[in-house]
Amino acid sequence: MSNYIHGIDVSKYQGVIGWPLVAQSQRFAFIRLGYINGDGSITIDPTYQQNLSGAIAAGLQVGAYLYSYARTPDAAKLAANRAMELVAPFGLRMPIAFDFEHAAIYQTMSRDTNAAICNAFLNTVKNGGYTPVIYTYYSFAKSWLDLDAVDAPRWLANYTGKIGIDGVDIWQYSSSGTVEGIAGRVDMNKAYNDFWSRYPNQPSQPVWEPLTDKVLEVYGTRHCEYFNTVDVNDVAGRLEPGQRYPVLGILDGVWGGYNWATIQLEGHEYYVALLDDRCRIADAPGCAEHEAEIRRLTDALAAANTAKDKLAAECAALMQKIKAAKAALAA
């Protein structure tokens, strides 16, 4: 394949990068966000923000990647949601890559399990509106990962002078390249498509599905915040535990790493990130839920009417006695 685009991938190990100089020879860059721990939490790369901002400002097309130690599909999904939250402010035009190559862990698992871990991350990213990419190296893929079972474009490392596997979108052909603007070695890549036009990272606006007869139930001890926009930094306030709020709609997919709903509160519409440990959408209470209360009120009303009739009869009898007494006095 002769038509390709040059790019690099970097992390804290490249130190301070002169991105305007890099942009003179490179078209794209993948920035490491950090690495995924076994439970799905992320240890942040301390340079990711300055590298994302610097590369974008220099005019490169920019993606991100996470090195994986995730041990389960659930852990991978958790990390994917966090990754989308980290990159949300930057407007990436290149994919979010899952760096799956840690043989010490994954050689102890089956190829099916490894594919399931990869797909959990990649599908979560895709459902969130980003382009996913699987990154690994040639001998790892041959031994412990069935790439045909992984549903994503491929980024493959092979330093032998050839790719070695069909259907690869990005080839990392060297780990010891030199690029002006970077002191020391850097990974070198060739992309065989321009992801920013073929796989645009969308959506540009969230898409909502209207809901009726649903409420947001707030529970637990952790704060459930509501927001002015679909941005977890734009906090409007906190919802009270034990309360229910009418739901107006639910987001189609994921935005910024979260599932969202819109609620009505004090005559205004607000946004809520749906977090399992503090809130959930439930059916609005129906008549069946209040049958006992309805029966109690009906019985109370009947008793009140009976008491009223009895009191009216007693009053009528008393009036008759008064009338008779007045007649006797007049005689």
Image (tube, rainbow, N blue to C red):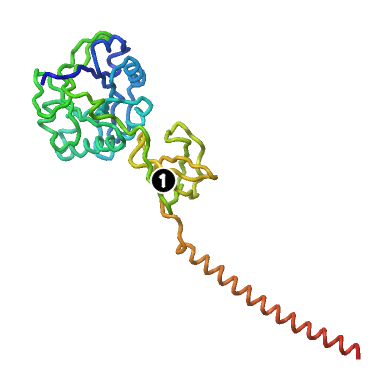
Residue nearest the observer in this picture, 189 or 193 = 193
Residue nearest the observer in this picture, 280 or 111 = 280
* Residue 229 occupies quadrant: top left
The reply, left or right, for residue 213 in relation to residue 172 is right
Label 1 secondary element: strand
Toward the bottom, the furthest residue is: 331
Residue tagged by mark 1? 249
Above or below for 4 versus 317: above
* Residue 18 occupies quadrant: top left
Residue nearest the observer in this picture, 78 or 315 = 315
Crowdedness near tag 1: few (<14), some (14–19) or many (≥20) residues, C-alpha within 10 Å: some
The reply, left or right, for residue 235 in relation to residue 307 is left
The reply, left or right, for residue 312 in relation to residue 170 is right
The reply, left or right, for residue 125 in relation to residue 139 is right
Above or below for 98 versus 174: below
Q: What residue is shown at x 44% (from left), y 43% (from top)? A: 262
Residue nearest the observer in this picture, 249 or 31 = 249
Toward the front, the furthest residue is: 197
The amino acid beneath tag 1 is Gly
Q: What residue is shown at x 29% (from left), y 22% (from top)? A: 62
Which quadrant does the C terminus fall into?
bottom right
Which quadrant does the N terminus fall into?
top left
Q: What residue is shown at x 13% (from left), y 36% (from top)? A: 148
**Number of numbered discs:** 1
Task: Give the image location of residue 222, x and y in percent.
Answer: 46, 41
Task: Give the image location of residue 187, x and y in percent.
Answer: 20, 17
Task: Give the image location of residue 186, x and y in percent.
Answer: 22, 14
